[in-house]
Image: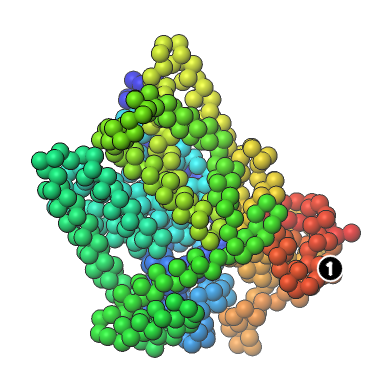
Amino acid sequence: MTRFFEANHKLLAVLMFATMLALGISSMAGDSGIVDEIAHIPAGYSYLRFGDYRLNPEHPPLLKELAAVPLLFMHLKFPTTISAWTTEPNGQWETGWNFIYHIGNNADRILFVARLPILLLAIVFGYVLYWWTKKRYGIETGLLVLFLYSLSPNILAHARLVTTDLGIAAFVFFAFITYFRFLEKPTWKHLWLATTFFTLVQLAKFSAVLLYPFFDLLAVIAVATWTRPQIWRQRVKIYLGGLIFIYVISFLLIWIFYVYPTWNMPHDVQTRLITSSLQYGLGAKVANILVKLSALPGMKPIVQFLLGVAMVFNRVKGGNTTYFLGQVSNQSFKWYFPLTYFIKEPVTLLFLAMLAIFSGLARYLKKTPYKIWVNFKSYAQNNFVELSFILFILFYAYVSISGNLNLGIRHLFPILPIIYLLVAKHTVNFVKKANTPTLRDSFGWILGALLVWYLFANLSIYPHYVAYFNEVIGGPGNAYKYVSDSNVDWGQDLKHLKNYVVAHPEIKKIAIDYFGGGDPKYYFCPRKYDAQSNLIANSSGYDCSKSVFLEWHAENGHPPANYIAVSETFLTNDLYWAPMRKDGGYAWLRAMTPIAKIGYSIYVYKIK
């Protein structure tokens, strides 16, 4: 098998890349818009086309602009005359609905084209992950990590959507491997590479600020464990100087990067955005400082970046409405991320991860278990990269668990590919270090069976990757008992619902309470035109009077229709909102059994 992999590793890698690309393109074509895409796509497009950053300032521009690049060649209309663009501070949602659905653009084409760059970034990330792992740990490990990455239902779910989750995972990894290279061989070339990717990861998602203290920690560990006494001071100067260089130059590069998307942004628009986004407590004090800074020449770009950072801290402090194990709260659940990881990752991956943990601990403890510092120093000297990754997984997991945002497994993306890498490394080592050829062959066959199971996990959920859950809870059909939101339902199945209704002509009228980034009127109702045959380009420009579609919400009670379709997020979150409204909400509906689950995220009921 080793000779086979050495002779055919390029072909096998190409096959996996092609499979990932094919699965991604074919599955995303059927998905409707998700919530975040309504804000991200028009925001990125407006940055590039107008040089104006008034939309979606709570996220950095890099990935949104990347997704918007192909849209520049489509001659699209943009709603620059509506109040959401002209007068409202950050009217991202209304602008997004109008841009994608109401103004006359082809919504499905916009969504498909904007998703392609993110999918291509996922392929590039897979290549770098494979190339770097193969170079450092061998061909078998490289192929195994590529297999785990390219066929991961969770990676594929978000590699096909215009969000920041896949991008932050990619650029965190790029930042790590370039920084490792600088620590190992501190040259100007490696320092500039580390600085470049540290800049890019900050431009991908604001949670990347966590790399500041963590890179400091890695430098300290490198000095404490690698450095010989006679060059200790020299290495301290090099690493400290390197960190200062990375932080200062990346800050300047971020400043420069923000120049173009803020070039035509009026000062009064930025001021209005700052004061409306940071209104309370410490945020209000920060807002006053930012307003004063924005009035200074050349400060507009960096003020926009600092505003985004401040908005994220406010967002984390405020929390979100979360459904977990039958409860709904606007505060976080401590076991949310551990359980979500355990039920959302394939069983094969969980098994191999446990094998890696126990086999790694067993080898570590064999070495004079009472000499903790000696063991740690020896391990750090020989396995610095692995130690760094383990510490980052623990650090990031702690921050996620102790934080106040429970928004799905996508918030663990920075550590998922790193886990795949460590699992692949230890799995290959475990098989190779078997005592006898017979035992090694047995381990190889078991591993092969587990990988077939992993492949089956992918194919069994295709094309509904967002809603993947493993066999531990009985698959996605039981997801509603555990979690909701982007783990299951992000609005991706509206087009699938439309296809279901078309395929069932007995449905004459269906009430729809939809959560997501699609617009049911766009898919179910014909457009309206004025007397001059001009499209009525706003949210009222649909004629739903003779449509099968009837817009509905929980507080409306029982609909005048024999069928109702409700997004899972609304069904679960109704447990929180109905008591606040002092009505029964969807209690009557939750007592019924759905006749269909569209992509596992939209429940269809026949009302007797």
**Which is nearer the eye, 563 or 337?**
337
Q: From the viewer's perspective, is residue 281 above or below residue 420?
A: below
State the residue in front, 530 or 465.
465
Q: Point out residue 262 in the picture as x, y percentages from the top left corner.
A: 34, 77
Residue 130 at what x, y percent from top left? 35, 39
Q: Is residue 290 above or below residue 371?
A: below
Amino acid bearing label 1: His
Secondary structure under tag 1 reads loop
Q: Quadrant of residue 503?
A: bottom right
Residue 297: x and y in percent read 25, 85
Give the residue displayed 64% in from the left and 75% down from the top. 527
In the picture, measured across the screen, residue 155 lies left or right of residue 540, that is left
**Residue lying farthest to the front in this orientation:** 370
Q: Is residue 607 visible?
A: yes
How many numbered circles are shown? 1
Give the class, few, some or many, for how many residues have Cα within 10 Å of label 1's Cα (few <14, many ≥20). some
Front in this rendered view, residue 439 or 375: 375
At 50% from the left and 75% from the top, the residue drawn is 92
Rendered image coloring scheme = rainbow
From the top left corner, tell me how far across and down residue 419 is, in percent. Answer: 43, 41
Instruction: Please state which of residues 51 and 400 is positioned toward the viewer in this rendering.
Output: 400
| Residue drawn where x is 39% and y is 88% of the image | 268
Residue 26 in view (yes/no): no
Q: Is residue 148 left or right of residue 289?
A: right
Left or right: 515 in relation to 301: right
In the picture of the structure, the residue carrying the numbered disc 1 is 558
Quadrant housing residue 54: bottom left
Q: Which quadrant of the rendered structure holds the N terminus?
A: top left
The C terminus lies in which quarter of the figure? Answer: bottom right
Residue 73 vertical placement versus 172 (above, below) = below
Identify the residue at horizontal 55%, vertical 50% (top origin). 337
Q: Is residue 608 left or right of residue 244?
A: right
